[in-house]
Image (tube, rainbow, N blue to C red):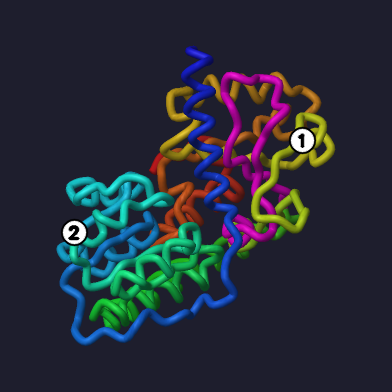
Amino acid sequence: MNNTRFSRIFALFLILLLLLAAPTSSAAAANPAALSKTPSRILSLSPAATEILFDLGLGDKIVGVTEYCSWPPEARSKKNIGDMMHVNMEVVVALKPDIVIISNMNEHLKSQIESLGFPVVVVYQDDFNQICGSMKQVGEACGAAESAKARIGELRGLVSGIAERASGETGRTKRSVLVVVGRDAADTSFNKVYVTGPLSFYNDLLTEAGAINVFTRSAPYANISKEGLLRLDPDIIIELVGEHGMTNVTTPEIIAQWNKLTDLKAAREGNVAIIRGDFTMRAGPRYPLLLEAFSKVINEGAREIWE
């Protein structure tokens, strides 16, 4: 393993993790400026927004995306404007969008974009209800209200079905689960492990899958040490491997690292699971797929899942 490379990749991942933990506005239903016509040129400055747009059949109207907009694969063919946090406004003007869609992660761009005369929609993604609300908002703003309404119904049905099955399968004491969203694979001491708390959408996934989040501090994400891991001592550990961080580390290598923590119940009993794919870090239309993966780990004993 190239430790320098792993550390560099992990540093990039931590930046993205900080974006996920960005504070959200209370105005989740904020309205874009009134549009005189249905948008035909849409600029998406958010991976979640890009997924929603394609999901609603609006992909052909997208004129630009950020470097993080990697799903669906067709998104990569769109003009890449680069960093979603530090957007070149000259590029925005040159693209002449009818509407710009951002997220709560880069909401600081809203006033600047609006000052240039472009309407802005902000999508929120801290829980499943916000995902659905954002889809409704995008649909209404972009001329796909009926498609959004139908798709939201489908997604709610999928989530409800998975949750009902999980409820039927867990006629026992609920398992305690720790969700790990980041750590440096080059540091096998486990002294800096990033986990999810009650204020992240992962908490909803655990609840719907019939489990309990063992990490109860009131925060979306937190950094804990090896000692913290041992104190929590969850029944199951789910480590998420997205598009950054530990992508070049094999599952057997990851499991081998955890297995060295013999004082940790989940490791000792073979209950460390790896879920791979960029959908693990995206709160968007693929939410039911991630919920299904969580349920398979918690209720069916799956220990490796690929998107």
Residue situated in front as seen by the camera: 211 or 165:
211
- The image shows a total of numbered marks equal to 2
Q: Residue, x 27% and y 49% (percent of image)?
A: 81
Query: SS at mark 2?
Result: helix
Left or right of 288? Residue 262 is right
Disc 1 marks which amino acid?
Leu
Residue situated in front as seen by the camera: 120 or 103:
120
Answer few, some or many: residues within 10 Å of disc 2's Cα (few below 14, many 20 plus, some between 14 and 19): few
Answer few, some or many: residues within 10 Å of disc 1's Cα (few below 14, many 20 plus, some between 14 and 19): some
Query: SS at mark 1?
Result: helix
Q: Residue, x 22% and y 67% (percent of image)?
A: 97
Residue named by callout 1: 229
Residue named by callout 2: 94
Residue situated in front as seen by the camera: 254 or 12:
12
Residue 298 screen position, x and y as percent: 61, 48
- Seen as rendered, the residue at the extreme top is 1
Tell me if label 2 and label 1 are in contact, CB under 8 Å. Answer: no
Residue 71 screen position, x and y as percent: 31, 50
Q: Residue, x 70% and y 60% (percent of image)?
A: 171
Query: Residue 160, can we see it?
Result: no
The part of the image, by quadrant, that contains residue 264 is top right
* Magenta segment boundaries in residue numbering: 175-204
Residue 300 screen position, x and y as percent: 56, 47
First reached walking from the N terminus: tag 2 or tag 1:
2
Q: Was residue 66 drawn as part of the magenta stretch in this picture?
A: no
* Quadrant of the frame with the C terminus: top left
